[in-house]
Image: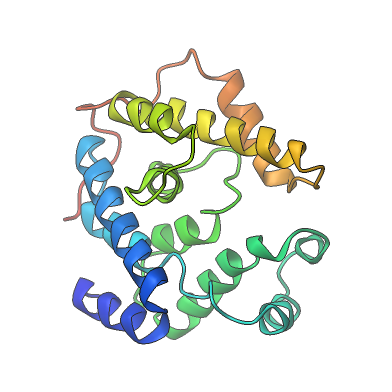
Amino acid sequence: MKIEVAHQVIEQTLSRPRYEHTIRVAETAEQLAERFNVSTKDALLAGLLHDYAKEYPVAVLQTYITQFNLPNDLLEFHHELWHAPVGAKLLEQKYPELDRAVILAIKFHTTGRANMTPLEKILFVADYIEPGRTFAQVEEVRELAIVNIDKAVQRALRNTLVFLASKNVTIYPDTLYAYNELTNNKEDDSIHGNKRTSPSSN
């Protein structure tokens, strides 16, 4: 898919505030991809399309989860998580030319998962730190994202877990698995600035 087409898709699909958020996420993802030597085109596409199904009615998302045979346990957790796997599946069907890596980044951008790919980490962090975010912990994650994407993801996950626990709500298992994996490996060599981790296909 061409970047121009992705722009058209989201402009026709999303409300203006959601569209503007999406543009900021895409620009942030592109910057992170350049910093960590990941395909900037893939990062832009993932950023532009990540909220494709965000504004679908909850009942419609629920129907798609069943129709697409997505994990049934999704329905046991907050509907804010549903748009990511549903959007990924819809995009996969409608735009088969989209790279699998982009689809997976979209699918896991709300929950994360263990053993995330570099592109998945970039989208996850870009969505968390885009310039429109103003919550208290965001600056720390922005600073970490300058030097180490793994540490940025781990800190964002930790903040999310603490927030959800404070609200006394259930936490999707993939988020816990992602946090545990990165916490266990936080001293290992990971993705550092100016260190090539995957071939660029800009």
Residue 15 in view: yes
Q: In which quarter of the view is residue 171 placed?
A: top right
Q: Quadrant of residue 85?
A: bottom right
In percent of width and height, residue 99 lies at: 36, 65
Asked whether, in this view, residue 72 is left or right of residue 21, the answer is: right
In the rendered structure, the answer to whether residue 35 lies left or right of residue 123 reads left
Q: Nearer the viewer, residue 159 or 114?
A: 159
In what quadrant of the picture does the N terminus appear?
bottom left
Is residue 42 at least partly visible in the picture?
no
The image position of residue 136, as x and y in percent, is 49, 34
> In this view of the protein, which residue sits in the foreground, 160 or 83?
160
State which quarter of the image contains the C terminus: bottom left
Which residue shows up at 60% across the image and 39% down it?
114
Whether 120 is drawn above or below 157: the answer is below
Is residue 198 toward the left or the right of residue 183 in the image? Answer: left
Q: How many marks?
A: 0
Image location of residue 112, percent across then percent down:
57, 46
Q: Is residue 193 left or right of residue 128?
A: left
Above-or-below relation of 171 to 78: above
Question: Residue 92 location in percent, x, y?
Answer: 47, 75
Coloring scheme used: rainbow
Residue plotted at (68% across, 32% down)? 162
